[in-house]
Each structure stands twice: as structure tokens, then as C-alpha cells.
Image (spheres, rainbow, N blue to C red):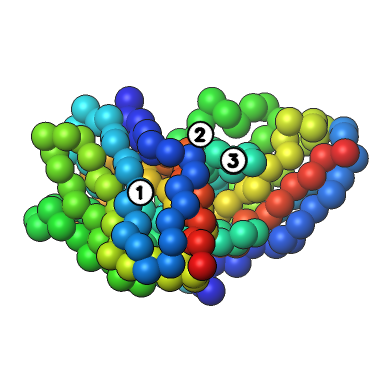
């Protein structure tokens, strides 16, 4: 079975500071990995995904994530936080084959301090 | 706007009543998923359609829940005899492609928030 653990349900950073949101996954097969962002009362928007190839993945809004197989991690980073980055962030994993249903972590709420 | 439309956005119902939600996916997407998200949690998979065929259902989908996608386009999710524990955000997602692949990205609707009182 696949699972995702997001370390820290709430992260707070100052505007302009580095954002680091942690995600570890468990999967018996090579996974697809995703980060989604959710603004209040909205659906989920894809930030970035890892499928195959380059392990450093760049996404929208200046975010990037690095797939580290040896550490089973897929941490999300952004060099300089902006007030508009305040939202809930979800890491997710899916199998390459089959239904490709997403298994989500519990989410990390990012707060940006002025 | 992802192109996936869900209606209604909000629904308040009394315990024991039946409710139905609708999802209109992106038109060329033949795979459709339903997820449920409770407060402070990540979404959980409920069920999955490829075209009109319902191919997988989660154990979370009790007998009171039923989903359909009659013509392989829009989908409905019905909850019968609602309970307070059904209160959640119900999210629909659609994916392009008939088989898994590198372009298999799920586009989510804005969700239907159900409150059972």
C-alpha cells in the first residue's frame, strides 16, 4: 500500500524567506509524485509532478521539488516566500499503472508573516 | 478555473435526507475520480470511472453512496440517508487519456461542501 507523510501540519515563514515543506512517501513500486495547493474553499491546483527523468522538478509560482529515492522524500521548496503563497499544500503519490488514484498526505498549512 | 465544474458548491441538508452532487469534467477527459476531504485532512479516494465504467470503489464508499457516469461525460454522486459523518468536501477530478501515462495529471473541481445538520 502507498502512503504519504507530511512533516509539520503548519509551517510559518517570513515574507522573502525560504519555504521548505517536507514529504516522505512509502510505495512498493516506483511512484508518481505530486504537490498540490489548495486555497480556502477551493479545489486543488497542481504545482508540480515527478514521473520519470530529472529528479529536480520545477513547478508553477517558483516552486520546485526534488525526488530522492534513497530517502523516499519529495520535499517542496521556494527560495523566497510571497504573501500569496499562503495556502494548504498537499503531497500525493500514485502508482504508475492501474487506476492511478492519488494518495494524499494530511496537508501542511503555510502561513506567510509580513 | 481548471475546467472541471461541480454543482452545487454548498449543500446543507438534514440528517436522513438524500443528496446528489454533479461533476462535469473537462470534455476530452475520459477518466473521472471522486474524493472526499474532511476538515484538516487530505482528500481520500472514493471511486473512479473510465468512460462510463466504474472500475474501482473504496471501502469508504458505503452502501449509502452511489456514483454514476451514464454517458461517460458528467458524473453524479448520491448519498442516501445522510449522516453527520458525511459532512465533508466532495471533490471531483478528471484525467485525460485512456491508459496511464506521463500526462496523467488530475484536474480538480472546486468541490461541493456538504453539511449535514
Identify residue for label 1: A21
Q: Nearer the viewer, residue B27 or A75?
A: A75
Residues under numbered marks 1 and 3 in contact, where contact means CB atoms less than 8 Å apart: no
Residue A92 figure quarter: top left
Q: Chain of mark 1?
A: A
Q: Position of residue A95 (x, y in %)?
A: 27, 40
Mark 1 or 3: in front is: 1
What residue lies at 21% left-to-right and 27% top-to-bottom? A28
Instruction: In this rendered view, identify the residue nearer to me: A28 or A61.
Output: A61
Position of B53 relative to B105 (above/below): above
Mark 1, Cα crowd under 10 Å, few <14 / some 14-19 / many 20+, is many
- Contact between marks 1 and 2 (CB within 8 A): the answer is no
Q: Position of residue B110 (x, y in %)?
A: 60, 62
Q: Which residue is mark 2?
A: B57
Q: Nearer the viewer, residue B33 or A90?
A: A90
Indicate which disc residue B117 carries: none
Amino acid at each position: 500500500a502507498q502512503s504519504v507523510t507530511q512533516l509539520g501540519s503548519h509551517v510559518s515563514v517570513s515574507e522573502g524567506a525560504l519555504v521548505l515543506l517536507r514529504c516522505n512517501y512509502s510505495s512498493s513500486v516506483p511512484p508518481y509524485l505530486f504537490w498540490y495547493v489548495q486555497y480556502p474553499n477551493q479545489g486543488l491546483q497542481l504545482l508540480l509532478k515527478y514521473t520519470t527523468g530529472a529528479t529536480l522538478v520545477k513547478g508553477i509560482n517558483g516552486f520546485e521539488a526534488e525526488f530522492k529515492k534513497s530517502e523516499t522524500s519529495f520535499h517542496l521548496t521556494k527560495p523566497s516566500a510571497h504573501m500569496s503563497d499562503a495556502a494548504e499544500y498537499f503531497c500525493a503519490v500514485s502508482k504508475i499503472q492501474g487506476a492511478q488514484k492519488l494518495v494524499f498526505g494530511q496537508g501542511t498549512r503555510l502561513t506567510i508573516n509580513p | 478555473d481548471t475546467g472541471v465544474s461541480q454543482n452545487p458548491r454548498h449543500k446543507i441538508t438534514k440528517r436522513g435526507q438524500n443528496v446528489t452532487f454533479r461533476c462535469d469534467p473537462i470534455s476530452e477527459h475520459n477518466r473521472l475520480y471522486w474524493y472526499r476531504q474532511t476538515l484538516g485532512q487530505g482528500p481520500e479516494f472514493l471511486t473512479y470511472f473510465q468512460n462510463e465504467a466504474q472500475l474501482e470503489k473504496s471501502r469508504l464508499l458505503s452502501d449509502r453512496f452511489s456514483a454514476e457516469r451514464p454517458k461517460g461525460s458528467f458524473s453524479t454522486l448520491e448519498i442516501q440517508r445522510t449522516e453527520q459523518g458525511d459532512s465533508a468536501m466532495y471533490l471531483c477530478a478528471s484525467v485525460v487519456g485512456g491508459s496511464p501515462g506521463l500526462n496523467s495529471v488530475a484536474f480538480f473541481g472546486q468541490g461541493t461542501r456538504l453539511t449535514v445538520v
